[in-house]
Each structure stands twice: as structure tokens, then as C-alpha cells.
Amino acid sequence: MPMGELKASLESVKCKDVRTYVQSGNVVFRSAMKNKRNLSTRLLDAVEKDFSFRPRLTLMTADELRAAADCNPFPQGTDQPKTLHFFFLAESPAAPDIEGIENAATDSEAYRLANLVFYLWTPDGFGKSKLAASVQRRLGVPTTARNYSTVLQIIRMTETSENVGNR
């Protein structure tokens, strides 16, 4: 979907300072609505009305995103941010396939599940990782993945958005 049209759709449901990050579907905005479940429903309804489909949505506050970055267990991945990946989970996995995760990981890869984030460091490349390709299935919950570079860019966007609200 065109990001300009997505921005307009979110503005139509009273989101403020709406900004999109490239053609990724990542959106930063401010909202007076504090209940995340109600806000998610409002956003999904708007997208469905305007684009005729209901996407999966991962809604995080700026603080939650910053906390995920701050809790990164693999500082060695920050030097090459496209090797470090954050899988944001829709919910806590009830019965993750730990054995399958361990078997899919290569010797060079490192991973950790903490709260609602599965961190994965893939120094040999994300595209070559069998674990990366199977994380969602092995965790048993919906996920959305972003590399560290994208996470940092979205955090910067939230900081700019917060400053707009403080003027």
C-alpha cells in the first residue's frame, strides 16, 4: 500500500504526527488513545476500510521499542546492524519448540527470547539462516522481524515525534 495513503488513513482516525518509514509499513504516530487494544482495533478497522484487507498489526509504545533495543543481548551485532534482528512477538509463546530452535541455529548464530522479543544475531547473513526462516513457526506465535538498523531508525522517529508534542 502507498505510505502516503496509509498516513492519511491513520490521520482519519485521529492519529497525530503520522510518519512512515520507507515502504515498510512501519509507522510512528501520536495518539490520545491509551488503551492499546482499542487503538489496534481502530487502526485495523481504518486500514480494512481504506485498503480492503485487515493486516496483522504489532503496536508498540516508544518506551517498549527503546526497552527492546536497550535489552539487546548481542552488542557484537550493533557494529553490523543488519546482522542483528528483533522478532517482536504478538504474545508470549505457550510452548515454543526449543529443541527445533537449537537444531536450526548454526554455530555462529546466537539467539535469546526475552519478554516479547526474540533476538537473533546472524553474522553469516539473515538470508542464509535456517533459524530466521523458521522462528515464527517454532515459537508458535505471530511475529514481525526488523533488523537493528531499522529498529534504531524507528526509535529516532519516535524521539522526533515526542519532541513535536513537547513544543
Image: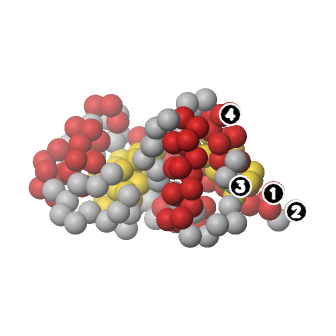
**Marks 2/3: CA distance?**
19 Å
Which structural element holds mark 3?
Answer: loop
Which numbered marker is on residue 164? 1
Residue designated by label 2: 167
Between 118 and 161, the one lying in front of the other is: 161
Of the numbered discs 2 and 3, the one sitting upstream in the chain is 3
Report if the CB atoms under discs 4 and 3 are less than 8 Å apart: no
- Which residue is nearer to you in this view: 48 or 20? 48
Q: Amino acid at mark 4?
A: Gly
The reply to whether residue 152 is in sight is no
Residue at the far right in the pictured view: 167
Residue 62 horizontal/vertical position (percent): 60, 61
Q: Tell which tag, 4 or 2, sits nearer the viewer.
A: 4
Q: Nearer the viewer, mark 4 or mark 3?
A: 3
Q: CA distance from mark 4 to mark 3?
A: 16 Å
Residue 115: % across, % down? 37, 67
* Cα separation between marks 1 and 2: 6 Å
Q: Which residue is mark 4?
A: 4
Asked if labels 1 and 4 touch by Cβ distance under 8 angstroms, the answer is no
